[in-house]
Image: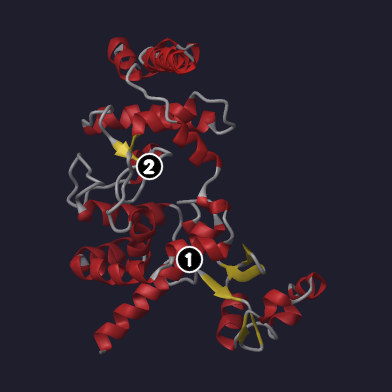
Amino acid sequence: MNKFLILILTSLFLHCTAYANTHFANRPNVKLFIQQMVKHHHFKKAPLVALFNTVTMRPAIMRKIRAPLEKEPWNIYQHLFVTEWRVKQGVKYWERNDAALAHAEKKYGVPASIIVATIGIETKYGLHTGKFRVIDSLSNIAFSKSSRAPFFRDELKEFLLLAREQHLNPAKVMGSYAGAMGQPQFMPSSYRRFAVSYHGRHQIDLSNNQLDIIASIANFYKLHGWETHKPIAVPILSNDRPFHFFFLSQKEKNRLMSRSALINYSSTQDLELLKNNPHKLIALPTYWGNENWFGFHNFDVIKRYNASDLYAMSIWQLSHRILSLREKTADG
């Protein structure tokens, strides 16, 4: 009897859940959003209602948005993203797209290595572009109680405008749990503002067209203020011994921040960079204390892609290793 009762209750729960999902558009906050899209952006109400009634509630999306990898310690994050596989595949990707990368570097002033590393970090060079419907990802967060809900409602608006402009079916576009799309993993607002067609066409393909992908990433960085031939980051050293700084007392670290003490903790070459370029301390948390670097303007430009210091450092380190291996292979 107990098993039978459990079966009935489970069936009722699943039925109610399915019923709620197929009537997503009847939620007050969703109805208000639809009204705003109709009034301010001239969408037709019926297709939007039909679209939102296909939205599936995905608990995994909310779990991921509450615990992004950027909350992990740097040593874990680095181990996940700055890998030998990404380095070797980055060199191969560069070889396959050498002409497009050279063109983008010349036109936008952004190093090819940074463009390649960005694709490598974001989607493993296009292997993993996302397994969630973007309409589900954005809607789940946009109409939740999350403090980030307003941001995602704006992105949902941008997504619907993007789909209309680019003639995409909004019910079929796939992306990340946060609604990022294509190999560059652009959020809808970034797609609309920074994506470009390599050949100047109206339609921009960030999923399969490597020319568009490369040009769009370069354009993103350029429009966010990338400074050509300027530094990104340098490690803080102690008498040219990496990592010694990390084990100093907090009092000693505070004293290090004085200009007069920098020469004791930076190589001669790095000291020249510090003298000639604005910089700030980047403290990357690890299980053993902070790993400390100085970041320059271009480090902050990378953070416009993802606001995490861990993310920006992974782009910088992966790009450096890809470039080093490419040069070593060419010399060999």
Measured along the vertical axis of the image, is residue 36 above or below residue 109? above
Within 10 Å of disc 1 (Cα), the crowding (few <14, some 14-19, many 20+) is few
Identified by mark 2, the residue type is Ser
Give the quadrant of residue 163.
top left
Marks 2/1: CA distance? 21 Å
Q: Is residue 264 left or right of residue 276?
A: right
Front-most of residues 63 and 229: 63
Percent from the top left, x then y, of residue 263? 68, 85
Q: Does residue 39 show up?
A: no
Q: Residue at the location (42% across, 25% down)?
A: 57
- Kindly identify which residue carries mark 2: 176
Q: In this view, does 20 lie to the left or right of 252?
A: left
- Kindly identify which residue carries mark 1: 79
Front-most of residues 219 and 126: 126
Kindly check if marks 2 and 1 are in contact, taking CB atoms under 8 A apart as contact: no
Quadrant of the snapshot with the C terminus? bottom left
